[in-house]
Image (tube, rainbow, N blue to C red):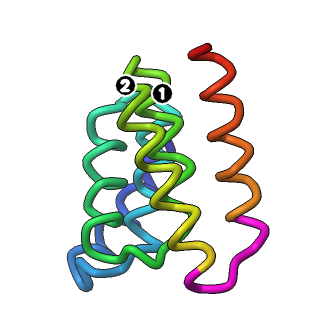
Amino acid sequence: MNDTRVKKLKEFLDADPSDSFSRFALALEHLKTGDRTSAQNHFEYIMDHDPEYVGVYYHLGKLYQSNGHAQKALKTFTNGVAAARKVSDLHAASELEQAISELESDEA
């Protein structure tokens, strides 16, 4: 983990806890180092407080999936498709639909 980057992201969050971009970037930094719990906590915070931040659904769903929580992953991907369509992000909706298809075929 890039300590300088993490420090700066934490400073941004201290100044504005609702800064989803910084929180998302911090979650990704945690994923890089294997701190999946911290990453999940940040992703879930974003999903709960900024549901139109569409990028979070894919990453959180994949994290749930890799942790063996297929139903939580499916629900997250499905909610993400709805959120993406709401903000007219058809690319994200398509990626999330693909994630659903892959998850369903893995579970079959």
- Provide residue 40's location: percent of width, then percent of height: 33, 43
Identity of the residue drawn at 61% across and 28% down: 103
Q: Which residue is mark 2?
A: 69
Frontmost residue, 81 versus 61: 81
Q: Quadrant of residue 10?
A: bottom left
Q: Are marks 2 and 1 in contact (CB under 8 Å)?
A: yes
- In the image, what residue type sits under mark 2? His
Frontmost residue, 49 versus 82: 82
Q: Which residues are magenta?
A: 86-92
- Provide residue 63's location: percent of width, then percent of height: 46, 34
Q: Residues within 10 Å of mark 1 (few under 14, many from 20)?
A: some
Q: Which residue is mark 1?
A: 65
Left or right of 108? Residue 80 is left
Frontmost residue, 39 versus 62: 62
Identity of the residue drawn at 53% across and 46% down: 59
Q: What SS does tag 2 mark?
A: loop
Camera sees residue 8: no
Q: What SS does tag 1 mark?
A: helix
As drawn, 21 above or below 43: below
